[in-house]
Amino acid sequence: MQSNMPKCSDLEKEILDLENEIRHIQNELFTGRGIGIGNAENTKIMKKINSLRTELRVKNSELTECRP
């Protein structure tokens, strides 16, 4: 059963990648690019950020059960 569990190092990398992607999207949204976008685009971007945050929470919870 343990072989089905993800490796901790793989999960940590995925978590870091997700955090970086969220940061990147937020930076785009709240810097120059975000000034000219409309509400529909803003909503789409926020949904993407929320989706990534949900995935991040799942990965963080999996981290408690990973194998070294």
Image (tube, helix red, strand yellow):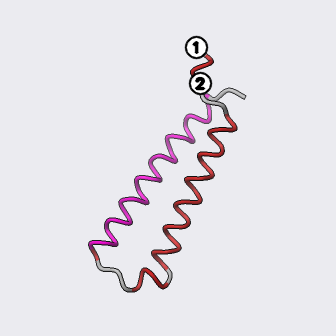
**Does 44 sit above or below residue 9?**
below
Report the residue marked by disc 2: 5
Using the rendered view, name the quadrant where residue 36 is placed.
bottom left
- Residue depicted at x 38% and y 66%: 45
Dot 1: what SS?
loop
For the stretch drawn in magenta, the main secondary structure is: helix
Q: Which residues are magenta?
A: 40-65
Residue found at the far top of this picture: 1
Please report contact status of discs 2 and 1: CB closer than 8 Å, yes or no: yes
Using the rendered view, name the quadrant where residue 12 is placed.
top right
Residue 20 image position (x, y, % from top left): 59, 60
Residue type (three-letter) at the residue carrying disc 2 = Met
- Residue depicted at x 54% and y 67%: 24
Q: Quadrant of the C terminus?
A: top right
The 10 Å Cα crowd at callout 1, few under 14, some 14 to 19, many 20 or more, is: few
Label for residue 60?
none
Left or right: where 12 falls relative to 58: right
The 10 Å Cα crowd at callout 2, few under 14, some 14 to 19, many 20 or more, is: few
Residue type (three-letter) at the residue carrying disc 1 = Met
**Does 25 sit above or below residue 62?**
below
Left or right: where 7 falls relative to 28: right
Residue 50 image position (x, y, % from top left): 41, 56
Residue 1 image position (x, y, % from top left): 58, 14
Report the residue marked by disc 1: 1
Is residue 41 highlighted in magenta? yes
